[in-house]
Image (tube, rainbow, N blue to C red):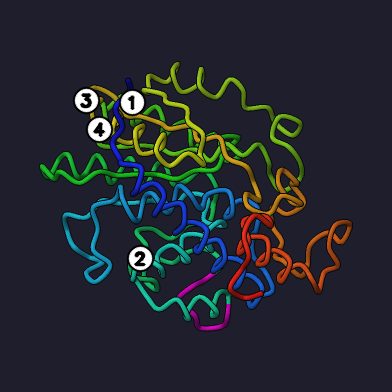
Amino acid sequence: MATHSIHEEKVKELEECANAIRQSLIEELVVAGSGHTAGPLGMADIFTALYFHVLNHDPKNPEWPERDRLILSNGHICPIRYATMAHAGYFPIEELKTLRKFGTRLQGHPERERCPGVETTSGPLGSGLGQAAGIAYGARMDGKKFRVYCAMSDAEHQAGNLWESAMFAANNHLSNLTGIVDRNNIQINGMTEDVMPLESLRAKYEAFNWHVLEVDGHNIEAFVDAVEEAKAIYEKPTVIIAHTIPGKGIKEIEFDYRWHGIPPGAGPTDVFPAKEQGAKFLAELRTLGGKIQSEHQ
């Protein structure tokens, strides 16, 4: 019988937490009137696992020197990072309603000097892995024990600078670095395999001398097990290819690339009228797709 790094009760707790975080995500996007929906919904389980189980961090002391570093390369999915950080205690949940507002700490791409707990300012896709590799290399030079995690989109693997960083990390045996690829198969203008095919992504990373793991990105237990396995790999960096469903939790928009870069209220109207989208999405999350009755009913 396989042994796991996390017990069933904790998994259930994290799954419930991820659902609450998805609700906060929809609420902040509706108020903002702009932002990305599909990718953030798909990464809710992974961000929940990271902030509530995996990362060694302290929300009350974001600059703690020994903290693990989480680099978000595809910064446009930051609404799910903000929602998770708020639930973890970095700032009040109510502050999520300032997303993308003038003067807010919660910009459309995270800014390191504005938001506590954000390690890097993102923007150009493909840049995060190089930043993460540099931090991991510096940590090893300084004899630090913290780990570095880099969340990446699948489509940003179409950028050449990402592969330069992959070579650097492998060449320097950065075993303190774990990449996490959101393999949701969509990008802003279509499905990745139609726009610029990425497969075999696993084979590409293996050719660059990375240790490669593949998991269901919505199986928290499997993701945590993969993270623990990565810690045991000492001669090379590890990448976890997490297969996720964009729009996860809202069945009507799952795997619909049109929801890549738009919020509820501005999305396609072939399923729900625009003005009903936010309420419909929240109702679906609160009832687990109609399986239970919501306290809001």
Q: CA distance from mark 4 to mark 2?
A: 24 Å
Q: Report if the CB atoms under discs 1 and 2 are less than 8 Å apart.
A: no
Indicate the secondary structure of the residue bearing disc 1: helix
Amino acid type at circle 3 is Tyr
Residue at image mark 4: 231
Q: Is residue 26 magenta?
A: no
Q: CA distance from mark 3 to mark 1?
A: 11 Å
Residue at image mark 1: 170
Q: Nearer the viewer, residue 254 or 101?
A: 254
- Mark 3, residues whose alpha carbon is within 10 Å: few (<14), some, or many (≥20)? few
Amino acid type at circle 4 is Lys
Please give the label number shown on residue 182: none
Q: Which residue lies most toward the bottom here?
A: 103
Does label 2 or label 3 sit earlier along the sequence? 2
Does label 4 or label 2 sit earlier along the sequence? 2
Indicate the secondary structure of the residue bearing disc 4: helix
